[in-house]
Image: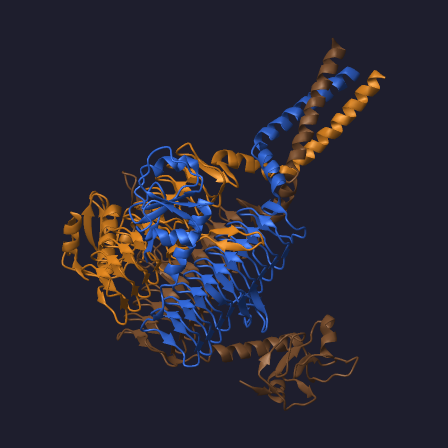
Chain colours: A orange, B blue, C brown
Amino acid sequence: MEFSIAQIATMLGGEVRGDASAKISMLSKIQDAKKGQVAFLSNPKYEQFIYTTQASAVIVKKDFQPKKEIETTLILVDDPYSSFTVLLEEYHKLISYQKSGIEHPSYQSDTAAVGKNIYRGAFSYIGNQVTIGDNVKIYPHVFIGDNTVIGTNTILHPNVKIYAGSRIGSNCVIHAGTVIGSDGFGFAPQGDGTYKTIPQLGNVLIEDNVTIGANTVIDCATMFGDSTIIRSGVKLDNLIQIAHNVEVGKNTVIAAQAGISGSTKVGENAMIAGQVGIAGHLVIANRTQIGAQAGISKSIKEEGQQILGYPAFDIKEYFRSYAVFKRLPELNDRLRELEKKMAEATATSANGQS
Amino acid sequence: MEFSIAQIATMLGGEVRGDASAKISMLSKIQDAKKGQVAFLSNPKYEQFIYTTQASAVIVKKDFQPKKEIETTLILVDDPYSSFTVLLEEYHKLISYQKSGIEHPSYQSDTAAVGKNIYRGAFSYIGNQVTIGDNVKIYPHVFIGDNTVIGTNTILHPNVKIYAGSRIGSNCVIHAGTVIGSDGFGFAPQGDGTYKTIPQLGNVLIEDNVTIGANTVIDCATMFGDSTIIRSGVKLDNLIQIAHNVEVGKNTVIAAQAGISGSTKVGENAMIAGQVGIAGHLVIANRTQIGAQAGISKSIKEEGQQILGYPAFDIKEYFRSYAVFKRLPELNDRLRELEKKMAEATATSANGQS
Amino acid sequence: MEFSIAQIATMLGGEVRGDASAKISMLSKIQDAKKGQVAFLSNPKYEQFIYTTQASAVIVKKDFQPKKEIETTLILVDDPYSSFTVLLEEYHKLISYQKSGIEHPSYQSDTAAVGKNIYRGAFSYIGNQVTIGDNVKIYPHVFIGDNTVIGTNTILHPNVKIYAGSRIGSNCVIHAGTVIGSDGFGFAPQGDGTYKTIPQLGNVLIEDNVTIGANTVIDCATMFGDSTIIRSGVKLDNLIQIAHNVEVGKNTVIAAQAGISGSTKVGENAMIAGQVGIAGHLVIANRTQIGAQAGISKSIKEEGQQILGYPAFDIKEYFRSYAVFKRLPELNDRLRELEKKMAEATATSANGQS
């Protein structure tokens, strides 16, 4: 993939100052860029690099006024940072759309219905009665259990494992090693101290535009007809635990190693930081922001709160309490000092009265 | 799999009122059930649905007296909920016993000894001198290292990875992506700041009736002849860390993302909640209950305690302390106020005495 | 693999007392050892076992004086424990160097350049333009994405997944299920509440002598030319999260289930305990020791500190504060008591003055 500077400028609606014919094959940062690469200048503190950069082109703001001579070609645009982001995206699309065709050996049931323009990596497995939309990319070692449905343009990275009966939307990305639809953790205690497994017969439903990180686990719902649900636009990071019958609302973002226990419903546009734990059967209001490592043991009813702690409460109040916590030995000393003085005062006063 | 209502009633020891010949192929909840499905009515607040349900049959209590006309067929039993659970289990068994036979390509060493009625999924790997009992299900992408022994009826979900020399019992279920027998985390510090790897030569021993969730890791023991041990009936959730030489006692239940450090022994029938961390070389008494996210830094000797906190102590005392923690800024203010009053009082008193 | 006792003694520079021709095939602990095994005696409290052990040989200190008759053969050395460790290592090398050759089916791109003496397990995948050094072991189900470079003697356990463009050094060990190079968690909020994916175009760079546990995740850097960096000698445990653009300094050790957020730089020879969480964009000084489950929200500038808490501060101060925390209800009572006394005193005094 090579473009001329002129092509890139056209793509960005920008204007070229310098040699528009040079070829660009890669993007880079202005301080590191080499020949054949395009960089951008947005933050003025990097301006120094534009006078020495090896980049074949630099994207700059329309009104940029060089203070010294410049050797590189300039592409003048309204907003260099967002223009560069556009290029990044285009490049990424080119890269991720590269993979296509069928690699061998791979396994596809005769009863699977698979769309057009699929990438099916070696050692991938597509079970019975699976339905897969167009342009889906299935990397090596992916497992797709029976009766699963997958929408269009979804990317399953190496070794994603999808249990039978799952429903996954369009334009989703699931990273390597993630498990969709494993059994919920349900066991009925017996009189003799053992546990009996409660069969887990529901599934997982993932709507469109969901991104899921690596080695995350989403359990299936317990009952037939029930689903653990990840609504459209949700972004999950790595190593997250989503238990049976959880529902995560639209556009909610959850950071790495957080865990949500069974049957809890998280609202829309919430932000849950890393290593947060949420107990089961709770309701978390829309736009709740939960700080890292917090433990949530009660439902959050008011929308848009910021909370922290174990169990969590208002984040500002947590920090105020924690500031005093750090001085607790001193507080204890002051309290003891007061008790001593009080005892003396009482004694004196008793003395005075006698 | 289709059953007549008469067959289901026989299975449950129940009595049919209505058309006993209709066919049932699935279970559902009464409010969602469709034709061809069976539901149950146990909680009276769902009674309304029995008059409108599309279910072909509903399991009800023997003495159920309809208040209106009912179209669906009734199956009368002593306890509708537990009857339904029986059906769920039967159904689940049917589903999970469906998979059988050998899918290709899969890999099995010539020196492996494999029982009868095995399911061996595509791309699964069975190493040298492996012994596998009857009725074991090995899903696609499972890796079974050399010299491993696996009992009868055990299910290994897609991509379970079992290192060489592991011992796994009968009637176990291990979910996708879980790793059994990876190296313990043992490194000897050297004079120059680097670490030397301590060879990890023990194995993992998992007894019968153990269930393990997805993407969990159980490390092997350090020394030859030693094992990291998971006793019979233990239930482990997803993304759990079990370090080298740990022993988890019979029927203990551990929730997602908990971690147990090296050489710790957890007793029987303990309950460890999500994201709990337990330090190394500890002993945790039988029936200990550890609250979510708690950190355990000392052995728990007394049986049946409930603990929480970081480090953890009695759960009720934790909550009492935490209630005061939340008001610490106020306590601090009150202390300051008292100090001020005391200073005034002392001054007054000194004044009075002068 | 069988050795005579004479061969083992030569290996250890020791002297044999007894039958030097007996064969040894395994190592064991003195209390468990059987015929054909070698054990060691270092701690005097195990001396009793040397008089009854079934071991064919026991490694003892040069100056060891038996109190009773001994049947086993002795190997006399300067330091029995370290001699035994040498044997363990040799044995381990023998075991791990056993695997070699190509198992079928496995997948290797025509454009991959692979060194000598490789083990390539069944169902492993080597992508385009991949470069692999000599003596590398690639276990079954490993995925190596396009353009990846791997040094010599590195071991990739079953199902390690390496995204395209990664760089991995020599003498590294990566355990089962670990993911290298998945996308960083980067999303730009849009006006309508949805998020737009920021393309993740950097890679992961792992230097030499790095060991990584099972089911850990290391995300790639965001920008072209940038890397998430794991420096030489780093030891990572299981289920760890390393976010985009993180750098972990030389010989730093991180225990299971810890997580490091984006762009944080951890210094050299640091020790990070289990379940620790570190926020993004921080700098952690060399030799910092972070206690289990601690939460780090600010950079640590001074080297060699020990910290704990949430957020973390000096570990000794944390424990002092926590000791008072556990008695907070009592403190609260004492404060209330003082307030009562003060009120009485003030009343009395006011009374006295009236």
Q: Position of residue C85 (x, y in %)?
A: 60, 75
Which residue is found at the position 56% from the left and 51% from the top? B271
Which residue is found at the position 29% from the left and 70% from the top? C127
Q: Position of residue B216 (x, y in %)?
A: 47, 59
Q: Quadrant of the C terminus of chain C?
A: top right
**Which residue is the extreme one toward the top?**
C354
* Residue A261 in view in this figure: no
Query: A169 above or below C67?
Result: above
Looking at the picture, tell me which residue is in the foreground, C68 or B97.
B97
Using the rendered view, name the quadrant where residue B229 is placed.
bottom right
Looking at the picture, tell me which residue is in the foreground, A212 or B106.
B106
Q: Position of residue A309 (x, y in %)?
A: 51, 40
Query: A112 above or below C132?
Result: above
Using the rendered view, name the quadrant where residue B193 is placed.
bottom right
Which residue is found at the position 45% from the left and 70% from the top? C172
Query: C276 above or below C175?
Result: above
Looking at the picture, tell me which residue is in the foreground, B187 or B170.
B170
Count of number-bearing discs: 0
Which residue is found at the position 59% from the left and 73% from the top? B225
Q: In the rendered view, does B208 fall on the left or right side of A44?
A: right
Looking at the picture, tell me which residue is in the foreground, B89 or A314.
B89
* Residue B77 in view in this figure: yes
Q: Position of residue C121 (x, y in %)?
A: 38, 75
Q: In the rendered view, does C7 fall on the left or right side of A125?
A: right
Using the rendered view, name the quadrant where residue A147 is placed.
bottom left
Q: In the rendered view, does A130 fall on the left or right side of C62?
A: left
